[in-house]
Image: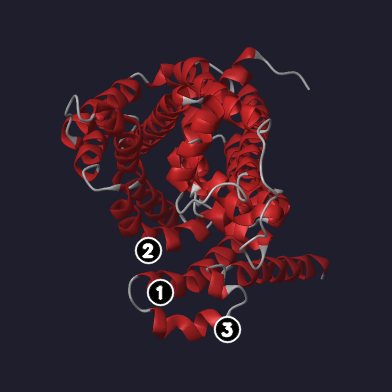
Amino acid sequence: MRFSKQTFVTAFALFSLFFGAGNLIFPAFLGYNAGDGWLMVSIGFVLSAVVIPILAIYGHAKLQGTMMDFGKKVSPTFAFIYSLVVYVISVSFPSPRTASVTYELAIEPYLKPTFEMSSWQFSTVYFLLVLVFALNRSKVMDIIGKFLTPGILIILGSIVCIGFFGEYEPLRASIYVSNLTSGILEGYQTFDAIGGVLVGGVLVISLSLKGVSKEESKSVIAKAGLLAGLGFVFMYVGMIALGAYNSGTLDINNRTELLNLLSYNTLGSIGRTALGVLVALACFTTAVGIVTGTADFFKGLFNDSRKAYIITAVISSVLGVVMGQLDVNAIIVVAFPALMLIYPITIALILLNAIPEKYASALVFKAVVVVTIVCSIPDFFSTIGFADAVQPIQEFLPFGTVTLGWLLPALFAFVLVNLIQYKRKES
């Protein structure tokens, strides 16, 4: 298998567009809590935080279209509503959250008390830079792939590699009842499945603007997805293992504290500065991907209007400044109910678009998506204050108590409809 320069640049860009602050802080703390069960939680985390998002990239490589194409087999109306909801959620919550995380972890601790910079001031500068990158979207992949991603890989790779040479106490026992399930659910919370559907469209359009043909684009994106996936596996498993090795040595209560200590213990005082740079790079590239993807979507709705692209990018950036004034926890709490409904639908669409078309007819799409939506509703109502009312339903559905009640019913619908269609062809 040959890899061109464009493939490597695309792979680096893909890695960076995916890699946000959540991807940075989840793995180490997961390993810390898993202790001697770190290998099984690693497998679970990789399944939900690497395999599914990369399958979304493969789906885009096959479709060579936008997010609208992911749901078009259900119906054009569904595809539009789904895409609109995802983009509105993305620019309203995850994108502003990148500014909040950067300010709280990478800016504020280093400026105080010698220099005061308010959250308003920082968010304004931050999203002005995001807007500059978005308006130069034909250069986005090259800039991110050639410069920003190597910085992330060098810093995080140094923390992981140097950390393995430390001296640690024996690993403590895992706190989880099921290490595999806990790993899957923690990866579920990264929301990278949505990122895969969004970012994949950015890659397709960016390569098109660079004059890459559709056939070549399919190959480039597929190979880039493989390379980026391997990079994620290395980083995630490395951070999970490093957190586990420290489980018997450190007494930690939260993710950020553990990450700070790991960076300090491996790279010394420069480690904390490096962590700040890493957080800033990871968050910034994610924000660029979200704003660019959203602007692409609305540009397509208005006959490829450049004006629509610019207006959407500006509005998304202004919204980022306003919503970015909320602290990180507040943004997560507000966004969580909507994500509990949209995320299962996204996973279902990714898997259906990734498998061979003979198993994913329009009827299969409709059945699986409808079942997924219906079985996800209890999880949605549980997060907005109706937990007691929907608890019996969650307990009735397999895996319903761990917010995966949609999974087996959707799988059953997939198998049943395919069997019915097969029988019809036979007769």
Counting residues from the N terminus, which is met first, the one under dot 2 or under dot 1? 2
In the image: residue 100, left or right of residue 346: left
- In contact (CB < 8 Å): disc 3 and disc 1: no
Q: Quadrant of the N terminus?
A: top right
For the residue marked with disc 3, what is the amino acid? Phe
Identity of the residue drawn at 35% across and 36% down:
105
Distance from label 3 to label 2 (Cα)? 21 Å
Distance from label 2 to label 1 (Cα)? 8 Å
Element class at badge 3:
helix
Which residue occupies the foreground of this view, 267 or 184? Answer: 267
Bin the neighbour count of mark 1 within 10 Å (Cα to Cα): few under 14, some 14-19, many 20 and up.
Answer: some
Element class at badge 2:
helix
Q: Which mark is residue 382?
A: 1
Identity of the residue drawn at 83% across and 67% down:
426
Q: According to the image, label 2 marks what residue? A: 337
Which residue occupies the foreground of this view, 359 or 408? Answer: 408
Which residue occupies the foreground of this view, 271 or 320? Answer: 271
In the image: residue 258, left or right of residue 177: left
Bin the neighbour count of mark 3 within 10 Å (Cα to Cα): few under 14, some 14-19, many 20 and up.
Answer: few
Counting residues from the N terminus, which is met first, the one under dot 3 or under dot 1? 1
Q: Is residue 353 visible?
A: no
Q: According to the image, label 3 marks what residue? A: 396
- The relative height of residue 148 versus residue 17 in the rendered view (above or below) is above
Task: Name the spot of residue 167 as percent of width and height, x first.
Answer: 67, 36
